[in-house]
Amino acid sequence: MALSRVCWARTALWGSAATPGPYVTRRLQLVRSGLDWGGPRSSKLHLSPKADVKSLISYVVTKTKVINGKYHRFLGRNFPRFYILYTTFMKGIVSIPPFANYLVFLLMYLFPRQLLIKHFWTPKQQTDFLDIYHALRKQSHPEILCYLEKIIPLISDVGLQWHMTELCTKIQRGTHPAIHDILALRECFSNHPLGMNQLPAFQMKALSRAMLLTPYLPSLLLRHRLKAHTTVIHQLDKALTRLGIAQLTAQEVKSACYLRGLNSTHIAEERCRTWLGEWLQISCSLKEAELSLLLHNVVLLSTNYIGTRR
């Protein structure tokens, strides 16, 4: 107010006939404007460029959550089975834009064997995909058997040499070996040349493929993983023996056989139980140092079993 009085005093001194110049008029307008609005606005009322970016990001995030919520409800209503898989895979693992979810859905539809777990396969897909996987592991069988033939001269015991020759000959002729034919060779697989620590890299790669494990690892890791995998199966065999095969459902029996190298998808349940009984009898007869025989048994016991040659 004091400033306003000074301005009006100056006007009075200049006289009523004197008209203030444009510069003075402009200053008076600015002063009055400032007085009317209570002084210049605080800078806090203006958003800085950084605040603008944060506001935009907050808006996008909010909209994305709304769209994702609608999309989740849509999947839950129209594709319940896929929604279970989607939430299991996506929740808490990755955050992607809503439109990318459709790409995931499309890829799972186009490549169910590679991207979906067995639980989400249709019955026909289960049969077809298990056949594909068994065909892949079966490709390594000739290589594994060929190595067993090659090391026969390296076996120091003549009797064991004869047993190994007989076993390889039976398998090559399409005969399913008996339990005693395999257990007779347990000594060969406890030390040189077929002990777990003496297996060459190429044999470990072939055995890895027979177990549906990747062979593309250094020899040290291949050996460690094969040991661990075989030990787990050996422990499961002991537990399964205590439980009894009769306690297993048909699907559990077929799954147990498939894990141990038998393509059980086209074999009757009773024959699967018979084969699993033979496997358990061999497994539970072996010591930890002889687990290389159990690893090779994936090929020895499954190659010529009834119904496996397709």
Image: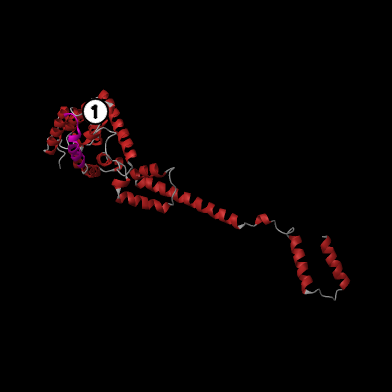
Whether the magenta-drawn stretch holds residue 152 is answered as yes
Q: Assign the N terminus to one quadrant of the image.
A: bottom right
In this rendering, position of residue 176 left or right of residue 289: left
Main SS category, magenta section: helix
Q: Quadrant of residue 196?
A: top left
Hey, what amino acid is under mark 1? Ser
Res. 176 in view: no
Which residue is drawn at the image coordinates 36% and 43% (left, top)? Answer: 85
Q: Is residue 277 above or below residue 89?
A: above
Dot 1: few (<14), some (14–19), or many (≥20) neighbours within 10 Å?
A: many
Whether the magenta-drawn stretch holds residue 155 is answered as yes
Q: Quadrant of residue 282?
A: top left
Which residue is drawn at the image coordinates 87% and 73% (left, top)? Answer: 14
- Structure colour scheme: secondary structure
Q: Quadrant of residue 47?
A: bottom right
- Given residues 235 and 163, the one toward you in this image is 163
Q: Which residues are magenta?
A: 143-157
Q: Position of residue 272 (x, y in %)?
A: 19, 32
Under circle 1, the secondary element is: helix
Which residue is drawn at the image coordinates 32% and 33% (left, top)? Answer: 228
Res. 203 in view: yes
Q: Position of residue 285 (x, y in %)?
A: 23, 25
Q: Position of residue 161 (x, y in %)?
A: 16, 31
Q: Position of residue 102 (x, y in %)?
A: 37, 52
Q: Assign the C terminus to one quadrant of the image.
A: top left
- Given residues 49 and 308, the one toward you in this image is 308
- Given residues 105 and 38, the one toward you in this image is 105
Q: Which residue is mark 1?
A: 283
